[in-house]
Amino acid sequence: MRTRSKVFFKVEQDADGYPGVGSESIWAASGPDEKSLIIDNIPFFATEANWGDVIAVDERDGVWWFRQVLRKSPFSLIRIVFFRTDEQQRVNSELTTFGCQTEYWAERKLLSVAVPNEKVQAVELFLDNEASLGSLDYEEPIIRGQR
């Protein structure tokens, strides 16, 4: 049986102090050995690993901390901020048709998206169109697919 644990990632803040947190905890399932975990949800701020990645961790003071990616998943990471939250469900629904996995944080108006690597270009085209309409903007912290 797989067990789930929290693993912590250091988060760098930009010049404006965004995102206002120094770390992010992400759920992970037990990995192939005692010092590895499999990322089990999509990060909102961390930029080193994504959903499905097998990672190495270090334990400090009873807490797991990310060390490195051991095996990359077949997913890229895109994050979307909504300026018009009434568009969130429609955009989320469209992304799932590309085979994406998503997680939404309503208070921050953020949607984190694990994009199948072979769908990166199609998702970028869709999001470019949505961004041109002014309802959202997006960033691509981890792109592993073909462009």
Image (tube, grey):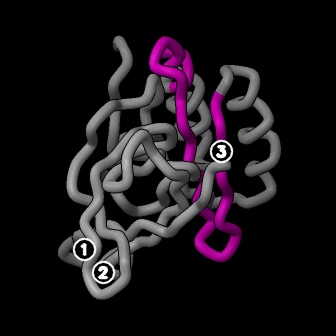
Distance between the Cα atoms at labels 3 and 2? 23 Å
Q: Is residue 45 magenta?
A: no
Q: Is residue 102 above or below residue 43?
A: above
Label 3: element kind:
strand
Give the residue drawn at x 50%, y 43%. Answer: 51
135 in relation to 144, above or below: below
Q: CA distance from mark 1 to mark 3?
A: 23 Å
Q: Which residue is mark 3?
A: 102
| Residue 42 image offset from top left, x and y in percent | 54, 51
Q: Is residue 102 left or right of residue 93?
A: left
Q: Quadrant of residue 62?
A: bottom left
Q: Which mark is residue 22?
A: 2
Residue type marked 3 = Thr
Quadrant showing the C terminus: top left
Amino acid of disc 2: Gly
Give the residue drawn at x 32%, y 67%: 9
> Separation of disc 2 and disc 1 at Cα?
7 Å
Give the mark, 3 or 2, whose residue is nearer the N terminus. 2
Left or right? Give the position of 126 relative to 118: right
The residue indicated by pointer 1 is 13
User: Would you call the spot at circle 1 few (<14 residues within 10 Å), some (14-19), or many (20 or more)?
Assistant: some
Q: Quadrant of residue 35?
A: bottom left
Q: Relative to residue 35, is residue 133 depicted above or below?
A: above
